[in-house]
Amino acid sequence: MGTDRKPGFRKYLLGGIALLILSGCNPGGAADSASVWHLDASFGSSGFTSPDLNAGVGTSEYLNSIARDTQDRILITGSRSVPGGYVMYTARLTINGELDTSYADNGVYLETAFSIGRDIQVLDDGSILVGGERDNGGDYDAAAWRFNSDGSLDNTFETDGISSLDIGGNDERSKAMVLDGTGNIILAGSTSDGSQIDLAIWRVSAGGAPDTAFNDPEGFVTDNSAAGGDAEDISFAVSTDSGGRIVAAGRSWNGTDSDIAVWRYLPDGQPDSSFDGDGIAVNDAGNFDECFALTVDSNNRITAGGFGVPSSMGYDLYLLRYLPDGSPDADFGSNGFVLYDHAGENDGMYDLISFPGGRILAAGFVTDIDDVQKMALFLFDERGNMTDNFGDNGIITASRGTNATGNAVVIDSEGRIIVGGDFTGAGGNRDIGVWRYSNS
């Protein structure tokens, strides 16, 4: 039903026709247009950096998540190709965009087992938490790593700095992570028995042990058929609301294609029946739809975004908003739904965050009429309309090699936008890219 865009990341094909192969190269490209916002010349080389993780020639590197610490140093995680697979890395950049050699091994920590880092957060004490998946020697487990502020594994977290989570010997993948209000770690992704893929959400204590009070005595919850197809349910994003309820978003197979799915669970791990009647809201926007990011605001409204294939024209960006009861927000877009198509080409988002003034900032990609995929930032107002005072009609794009994507976005203490992603370089391998934008 799908192929991988990057390690562990599935993308569907429409009617057996592959996604348009993107080509072209502009190695020296920068932001194509910006009104007030511009690449920050004090960061990297003219606002862009591609840190060298000492990978060597012929190796690919992917950036999946980005965070900052109190000194505005930038933490990133993802994966690096090695013979036979991929390994998780974390790295820290200085405020100027250089590798921070005081962190781990000259700025980089590399896992020894096959693994992928999906999400990274900096805790209040300066320690660093990474969520993802790790090979246990037979299959993959959902995993959480905790590091000291210097990049060394924190051996007070479990016994070796790593918490691995298995469900009955199945293959587990964690795609997203969030901390709840009590310091517990929530991981969301999937579990597979080889015949079907089910949604899985785990809760882990601050010390790294599975929390058996969550869906007592399991420590995890699963769901196998949100859209009715009983073949694949998976979460790519997770958050919590003001009541401690867990909100996850992703996709679910309906028997023909995938729909956007949003799940909400009570703090004890039970489905929240006050959310659309059964704890699950499903949106069928056309053909293959999937959700990769979400936020929950102070009113417990859920904003979720991703992309899908509403027609044979290719991928379009989706943005949805749900009220606390799981119904679409009629004041947002068209009955809670926004469809954005950039110049009739492919576009979508992988991350979104709240922006001042109730606006929504998303990171992803667009493909221009020259068939080059570019990293893109999208700014929507509080009602889901594209803003007209941000870049070119609400979009800032940046070329780098080919097939550039913005996979994660964060705002630093100075209000600058930092977006991380990856791109295909001149040698055909994936390289990490980090851009910083300023409006001062």
Image: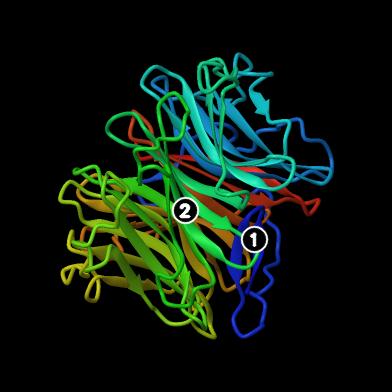
Query: Of callouts 2 and 1, which one flags the residue occurring earlier in the amino acid sequence?
Result: 1
The label shown at residue 200 is 2
In this rendering, the label closer to the viewer, 2 or 1: 2
Q: In the image, residue 5 lies at what x, y percent?
A: 64, 60
Name the residue beneath numbered marker 1.
Answer: 5
Image position of 101 with respect to 59: above or below: above
Image position of 136 with respect to 246: above or below: above
Q: In the image, residue 259 lies at what x, y percent?
A: 43, 74
**Helix, strand or loop at mark 1:** strand
Amino acid at dot 2: Ala
Amino acid at dot 1: Arg
Image position of 313 with respect to 102: above or below: below
Image position of 271 with respect to 414: above or below: below
**Residue ID at (50%, 76%):** 288
In depth, the one of 99 and 225 nearer the eye is: 225
Q: Is residue 318 visible?
A: yes
Q: Which quadrant: the N terminus?
A: bottom right
**Residue ID at (25%, 53%):** 359
Cα separation, mark 2 vs mark 1, equals: 22 Å
Mark 2 neighbour density, 10 Å: few (under 14) some (14–19) many (20 or more): many
**Residue ID at (55%, 69%):** 368
